[in-house]
Image: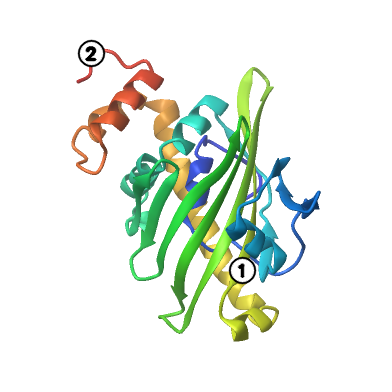
Amino acid sequence: MSGVRRSGAAALVLLFALAAAPGGRADEREAGGRPRLLDFEFEDPAVRRVLERTTITRAIEPTRFIGRMAHEEFLLDRLPLSAALGRRLHPALEHYRITEKGRGVWAIEEGESIRGRTRLIARAPGRRVYIAEGEFRSLAQLLSFEGAMVITLRYWEDEQGGRAYLHNAPHVYVRIENVLLHGLAKLFSPILHGIVERRVARLAAAANAVSDRFTRDPAGLYREMLGWPEVSERDRAAFRRHFGIEGEE
């Protein structure tokens, strides 16, 4: 995923639920007895449970996108809209669904492969932390387990040659509840790497598709969204305001 891509869509990182591989520890495990990630301290017992006995973890290679922080924040604040955009503009994501269940809480599913719930547990400009809990199936349903994942996302903007670029650096920490799989994580490493690579490739392609439309034709994209029943009027109005689209109702 290295290199320059036309995207401001790191919110799509949250559309795949197992971007993890063996190795490493939490980058800021403890501060004063409480878990600490991206300069946030947590008392949340679910976060502590994942970090105190992480099965697998991965710092995903930072990506560099053409885009702006404002677009990033817009999508991260509207995960159902991010999922709808990815699904409509990139067919490989057609089975993904994100449904808002409350303030900062979303249900996420991908066909029969993923069933879970994600909640935002900390946010600040350029930093967010989520926890996802649920069930994952892969390899024609042969690999199946329940677990939880803490996702940290750091993103920042800079300029080169008069053009704005976004950098995204996710890190995930996964706890597998199945005792056998937890103990055999290293043995399953090649399988997990394959899952990661396939999901990251789909994610990158979807992010590129969304970003291309954001950059090239937001008004045209908005007109298409008028025919998408899964996009709420609230999100359409927010999109219209964000991109300064006038005379489109």
Count the labels in the image. Answer: 2
Q: Are marks 2 and 1 in contact (CB under 8 Å)?
A: no
Q: Of all residues shown, which one is farthest toward the top?
A: 246
**Coordinates of residue 208 in the picture (x, y in percent):** 48, 42
Q: Which mark is residue 175?
A: 1
Q: Amino acid at mark 1?
A: Arg
Q: Is residue 207 above or below residue 132?
A: above
Residue at 33% in and 59% down: 95
In terms of depth relative to the viewer, which is nearer, 12 or 30?
30
Instruction: Tell me: 141 left or right of 170.
Output: left
Q: Amino acid at mark 2?
A: Gly
Residue neighbourhood size for the residue with mark 1, other residues' Cα within 10 Å, grouped as few (<14), some (14–19), many (≥20): many
Quarter of the image where the C terminus is located: top left
* Residue at mark 2: 247
Q: CA distance from mark 2 to mark 1?
A: 49 Å
- Which is closer to the viewer, label 2 or label 1? 1
Outermost right residue: 32
Which x, y percent locates residue 235?
31, 32
Q: Residue at x 71, y 47 (%)?
A: 37
